[in-house]
Amino acid sequence: MAKYVIVGASAAGIGAVEAIRDVDPVGSITIISDEPCPQYSRPMISDFVSGKADFTKMKCRDDEFWKQTNAEAILGKKATALNLAEKAVSLESGEKVPYEKLLLATGGKPFVPKMDGQDKDGVFTFTTIKDAVQIAEKIDAISAKSAVVVGAGLIGISVTEALVKRGLKVTVVELQDKILSLLLDAKASEIVEDVVKKAGVDIVTGQSVQKIVGKDGNEGAVGGVILTKGGQVPCDLVIVAIGVIPRTELVAGTQIKTNRGIVVDSNMQTNVPDVYASGDVAEAYDFILSQNRLLPLWPLAMIEGQVAGYNMAGYKTTYAGGTNMSSLKYFGIPVVSIGLANPKEDATLEVLTKHDAERKVYKKLVLRSNVIVGMTLVNSIERAGVLFYLMKNKVNVKKFKQKLLEDDFGLACLPLSLQRKMCVVQ
Amino acid sequence: MKRIIAKQEACMGCGLCEVYCTVAHSKSKDIIKAYNSERPKPISRVTVERNKPVSFAIQCRHCQDAPCVTACLSGAMTKDEKTGQVTHNKEKCIGCWTCIMVCPYGAIKMDKEGKVVAKCDLCQGLEEPACVANCPNQALVFKEVKP
């Protein structure tokens, strides 16, 4: 019997395997993935489509990983049922995998709203390597010239960049009034939008796609989309990139508590003892909002997986929490956005901004009681990590507040006591 | 492991560490070529932090629990369990800047031309890191410290 069973072999699953092996070199690990080739970097699928990375480069751990960690990887098989009383996971092949400790790291799946014509040939989602391979092959097969991307979030803009690099004319359709609306405020979004448009991309905001229409003479293939306000955009491909929702099917009907995702405590354990959840499927702690919520982000999934792994192996560890945080490189403009980057009007918040239109530099910090709770940095991100440290450690910045947005802000601006704590000076 | 430690009271903020780091990480190892003609332009992995009258040089701390390693999307940043070093594989790096977002020391640099990051590798192959060896006031020391 496997001591540890992990369902899902992406960031959270990998993080858990590494953590378990850090404290338990011998306990048997079985990891189950419905993908034939795990240990690849999901965020890199856009680099695959653009041609910047091949699959070898996308492997975030080398091929020896499962051997080195002495983990049995069951690949290309889907876990279909969970029996908590029996402590076993059933696979679609009929096999049963019993466990002592279980981690659910099943991730997310693309959310696709109902659209007329969505079953036409040439409609894709964009979350796995399979999607990326299919899109790349389709572009070649039909010599695709144009695409409509539905959704201007992280996935939407990243696939847009990849398609532009492949030479396609791309139209992005976004329901909100700006691109990257969950991450950026109006100003930052405008700067990025400007760069995206200069790359030849059309951006339609405040609308969605109501219908996907066929090609003349080939109704079954994508020929264009009709927008909600009636406009029509011809295209060869449609990529639906509205967002991801947790893959909670495995726990449906069990006593494992779910909200939007699987509910976990600060040890990443569910309400059922010995069953843990991490990554896009779990609602983990947000240290800025002081509540648990879905945060489908690779680096957080990795840490959550590590925390689960340590606890599963008996090394008590608490998850310090993450927050909405992303670093973007789209179309060559670096952007970092963390926490309450775009808060609603709130008298308890103090907002510091600096904008240099010529250099396309925009910096914004959001403070509450002299503690950083949100930030956006556009085209000047080198000091993002220092600011994030202050944010994460809830450092009172009152004494050096005026320095925070300066170009020469850095560790030398911090109080000596903090420099010593960080061990940067003796 | 041996780490580079800054002595704030001895640092004059001259920036020579940055110059020698740049040259040490250039292809030519020649100061004129490194600064004038080499492409992609070699960049310094050490930064002199200045806030008058305070100055000190900082580079990758090779953290025990390195946030950059956990955050790295592509597996380019790894922790060598034997040496304790945080190593960066340029070939695997995709320049997503996620490590820059989480490095508390701001010690990871953007190599904009190469579209990858660059950071201190403790000058592999040299007896002593170039910044330490060439500091005119011995404000950088390379010594064994507990992680």
Image (cartoon, grey):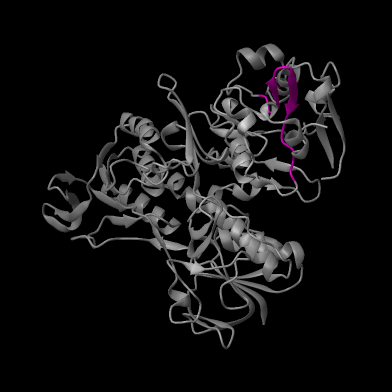
Residue A65, percent from left and from top: 66, 59
The answer to whether residue A37 shows anywhere in this view is no
The residue closer to the viewer here, B62 or A47, is B62
Answer whether residue B61 is magenta in the image. Answer: yes
Q: Quadrant of residue A89?
A: bottom right
Relative to residue A157, is residue A9 drawn left or right?
right
In the picture, the quarter occupied by the N terminus of chain A is: bottom right
- Which quadrant of the figure contains the C terminus of chain A? top right
* Nearer the observer, A334 or A283: A283
Residue A194 quadrant: top left
In this rendering, does residue B43 appear at all?
yes
Identity of the residue drawn at 37% across and 30% down: A191
Residue nearest the observer in this picture, A280 or A415: A415
Q: Residue furthest front?
A: A347
In the image, residue A16 sits, relative to residue B99, either above or below, namely below
Asked whether, in this view, residue A147 is left or right of residue B146, the answer is left
Residue B41 pos. (x, y %): 60, 21
Residue extent of the magenta highlight: B44-63
**Image position of A321 with respect to A157: above or below:** below
The quadrant where residue A260 appears = bottom left
x 74%, y 21%: residue: B55
The residue drawn where x is 47% and y is 44% is: A340
- A409, above or below A53, in the image: above
**Residue B124 is inside the magenta segment:** no
Q: Position of residue B49 (x, y in %)?
A: 69, 24
Residue plotted at (32% across, 37% down): A167
